[in-house]
Amino acid sequence: MKGVRLLKITLAVALLAVIFSACVKPEKKPGQVVGGEPTITLYVNETGEKKKIKLEEYLAGVVVAEMEPTWPQNALAAQAILARTFTMENIESGRVKKIHGTDVSTDVEESQAYDPSRINERVKKAINDTRGQVIKYKGRYVKGWFSACCGGVTAGAEEGLDWKKTKTPYIKAGLKDGCMEITNDENRDWWVQFPISTVRQAVKNKTGQDPGDITGVEIVKRGPSGRAEEIKLGRITISGPALRLALGSEKMRSTLIKEIKVKGDNLVINGNGFGHGVGLCQWGAYKMAQEGKSPEEIIKFYYQNVTIDKLWK
């Protein structure tokens, strides 16, 4: 009888444990996937609306805004993997949550570009073909950086973005992808000039210090890819990426500078490429896709020693 009673007690304890474990759900951390494709919250900066949306549906609006929807299918697919990785890493960091209380937003400074009005069948296929796929390095999401045209040579995170917060060993400087063979003329060789008064104010706004009279300019440090890491203007030395942002990244198209000089009342800059040059180069991805490279091969050219993991079916 004693043995029967002990068995009943054991079974009762086991039953309670099962019931308890079924009732207690594991705590879900930001960026952690539990139970398949997540529904995320999106802040629409243009209207102030907050809405729920399936992550893959959101990504279609991102890919079409970040890359031309008529581009080669495997380039679009590589962009989709990168966009998904960027999104998951962004959600995990909680950056947008602190600003808007949502997972992501439509602001390119906070998340990624977003334009669902341009979605076509090619973009839908790129999303579906790579569904759930993300890039990881030693089990963690990589920084999903990309630029339009690296100018034929990729940049390290510190030289291209002045990024010093974390180590990014999977990002390599000096990779040559041949993008200059197929990119448009504006990316091969661009010129821009800014009034010295505009440059002085831009540097002051960015650094909090007045550079004074700018009668000359000097690149005091170049990075591994040849980009201008530090530029001296008047009394102030400013990082190349900071100067580009201060003057406008659409105008000063990159920091892969061939010549920079003061001419009369203007600062004149001549350079190659478009963007910071860190991570995937979109024109390079275009070229590789044309050559028959798979999305995974394109990703692993720009991101070293990484895995492409599938988070959901």
Image (cartoon, rainbow, N blue to C red):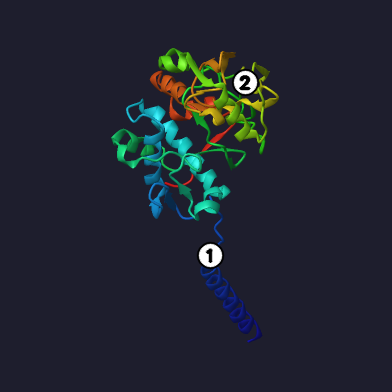
Screen quadrant of the N terminus: bottom right
Q: Nearer the viewer, residue 285 or 263?
A: 263
- For this view, does 264 lie left or right of residue 221? left
Residue at image point 65% right, 34% down: 207
For the residue labelled by badge 1, is the local secondary structure a helix, a strand or a loop?
A: loop
Which is nearer the eye, 235 or 35?
235
Q: Give residue 294's position: percent from left, percent from top.
A: 43, 26
Check the image and report above or below for 126 versus 44: above
Residue 302 placement (x, y as % from top left): 54, 26
Q: Is residue 255 above or below residue 32?
A: above
Say which mark, if any, is on residue 228.
2
On the image, the x and y values in percent for residue 13 come to 60, 76
**For the view shown, which residue lies furthest in the left direction?**
121
Q: Foreground: 158 or 235?
A: 235
Q: Earlier in the sequence, mark 1 or mark 2?
A: 1
Decide if residue 33 is on the left or right side of residue 201. left
Callout 2: SS: strand
Q: Which mark is residue 25?
A: 1
Q: Hey, what amino acid is under mark 2? A: Ala
Is residue 131 rendered to the left or right of residue 144?
left
* Badge nearest the viewer, 1 or 2: 2
Residue 9 in sight from this viewpoint? yes
